[in-house]
Amino acid sequence: MAVSLQDKQKDMLLRMLEFNVDGGSDAANADRWGEQWKVLVYDHYCRDIISPILKLHELRKKGVTLHMLLENDREEIPDVPAIYFVQPTTANLERIIQDSTKELYSAMHLNFATPIPRDKLETFAKGCVDAGCTAMVCPYIVTIALSL
């Protein structure tokens, strides 16, 4: 059976919503991250990637209680982790640092739609250290290449 590109994209997005953990194939593992409430934060570019692939009920099944644009002002939800899916632009990285210094969420899982250049990654890391917010950002950054 052939797998379509959209099926692969959907699988990668669902894995992102499971904090990029390989859940295996059994039903208990497949649903375990749906029990963990989370917030999805994206930019316009990534919203346009997600919206034709995942429907609202699929986000809810994976525990996404809110989905919001990075550019918008957002309120603190300190007991819920956030999954970020954005392009690695300077403006987005600065906004992520702002979010982490405000401690909007319990943890921040970063996923980028395109590879993050080394110089931007180093600038981001330095910004997190200077702001004293390294504990907020989970210790790995994932690139999810879904575009053609």
Image (cartoon, rainbow, N blue to C red):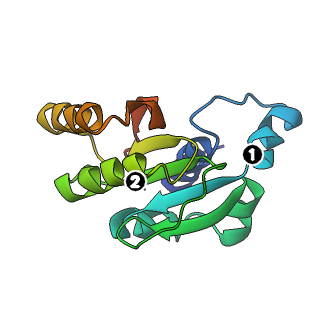
* Residue found 37% across the figure and 45% down from its top: 145
* Residue 105 drawn at (x, y percent): 55, 50
Quadrant of the snapshot with the C terminus: bottom left
Q: Which mark identifies residue 79?
A: none
**Residue at which label 1 appears:** 36
Q: CA distance from mark 1 to mark 2?
A: 21 Å
Whether residue 106 is visible here, answered yes or no, is: yes
Name the outermost residue toward the right: 28
In the foreground, 72 or 18:
72
Determine whether 47 is above or below 144 in the image: below
Identity of the amino acid at label 1?
Answer: Gln
Which of discs 1 and 2 lies nearer the camera? The answer is 2
Determine whether 21 is above or below 124 in the image: above
Quadrant of the snapshot with the N terminus: top right
Task: Tell me if 145 is positioned left or right of 74 in this view.
Answer: left
**Residue at which label 2 appears:** 99
In the foreground, 111 or 106:
106
* Residue found 62% across the figure and 30% down from its top: 21
Task: Tell me if 63 is positioned left or right of 100 in this view.
Answer: right
